[in-house]
Image: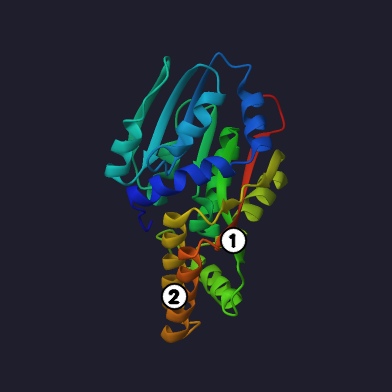
Amino acid sequence: MSGFSADWLTLREPYDLRARNPMVLDAVAASLEPLSSVRVVDLACGTGSTLRALGPLLPARQSWKLVDSDLGLLARAEATPLAKHVTVTAIPLDLNRDLEAALDGPVDLVATSALLDLVSETWLDRLVVEIAARSIPLYAALSYDGRIEFTPADPLDAAIAAAVNAHQRTDKGFGPALGPAAAAFVIARFEALGYSVVHGASDWEIGPDDFDIQAEILAGWASAAHDIGALSLAETTAWLARRRDAVAAGSSSLRVGHVDFFATPSATR
């Protein structure tokens, strides 16, 4: 998979935390509340944001397997300050090749954040089948769903958003990504296999004072639009300059659409 820097993951974490859907989080917590201890596998854990967001809501005794292919990110995740009775084990794995190994052993919950929109339909189907075969619940947060709202509006916003969504469907190391359609695809697949699914929006709300993350997002979107070739370099550069002017003036805000869901076997485990 194309890697993400620790700096970017650190920058986005507060916005992720604020965006996580509380109804979905409540469903996860309620499902696991009867357990005296919880064993969690966190796929593509990055720097450990899911551990930090979800851990405080789970039973006190927790054992986390943090899985990622990036050793630097794993080291940061493993260094997360932990509450008493919480243990973590860093597992360096290529999820494209070794997904099944990541899920082996006793597991009460599989969790992941900001992953599903980056992988292919084939890989997602494999994930669903492997999880359902083990009758494990899945908490999947912050899957991008293609919705972007810009304030103030610019004539090229729609073209940039379309280019970004096209770029989301390119190969990130797992085959052509399903991109904005990923969450809906996985939800439908789990429901077809008899799972119950709670889902809801988890949109980033990025305001006029959020200068740093706006700068990173807008530059990334301009780069994606250029890579796709949907707009000329002059158009993309001019759009980015106007957007940066709005950020500097304190008049720019963004809404970026995401979906969270919790899929659990309907039968009592």
Residue 268 horizontal/vertical position (percent): 69, 24
Dot 2 falls on a residue whose secondary structure is helix
Residue 256 horizontal/vertical position (percent): 58, 57
As measured in the structure, the alpha-carbon distance from the residue carrying label 2 to the one carrying label 1 is: 26 Å
Up/down of 130 relative to 30, above or below:
below
Residue 236 horizontal/vertical position (percent): 46, 79
Q: Residue at x 49, y 65 (%)?
A: 249
Up/down of 123 relative to 34, above or below:
below
Q: Residue at x 43, y 44 (%)?
A: 99
Looking at the image, is mark 2 or mark 1 earlier in the sequence? 1
Q: Residue at x 55, y 48 (%)?
A: 142
Q: Residue at x 51, y 46 (%)?
A: 15
User: Is 253 displayed left or right of 103 in the figure?
Assistant: right
User: Is 247 displayed left or right of 201 in the figure?
Assistant: left
Quarter containing the C terminus: top right
Q: Examine the rendering and report whether any part of residue 119 can be seen.
A: no
**In the rendering, which numbered label is found on residue 180?**
1
Q: Examine the rendering and report whether any part of residue 146 can be seen.
A: yes
Which class describes the residues within 10 Å of circle 1: few (<14), some (14-19), or many (20+)?
many
Q: Nearer the viewer, residue 232 or 68?
A: 232
Q: Nearer the viewer, residue 72 or 119?
A: 72
The amino acid marked with disc number 2 is Ala
**In the rendering, which numbered label is found on residue 241?**
2
The amino acid marked with disc number 1 is Pro
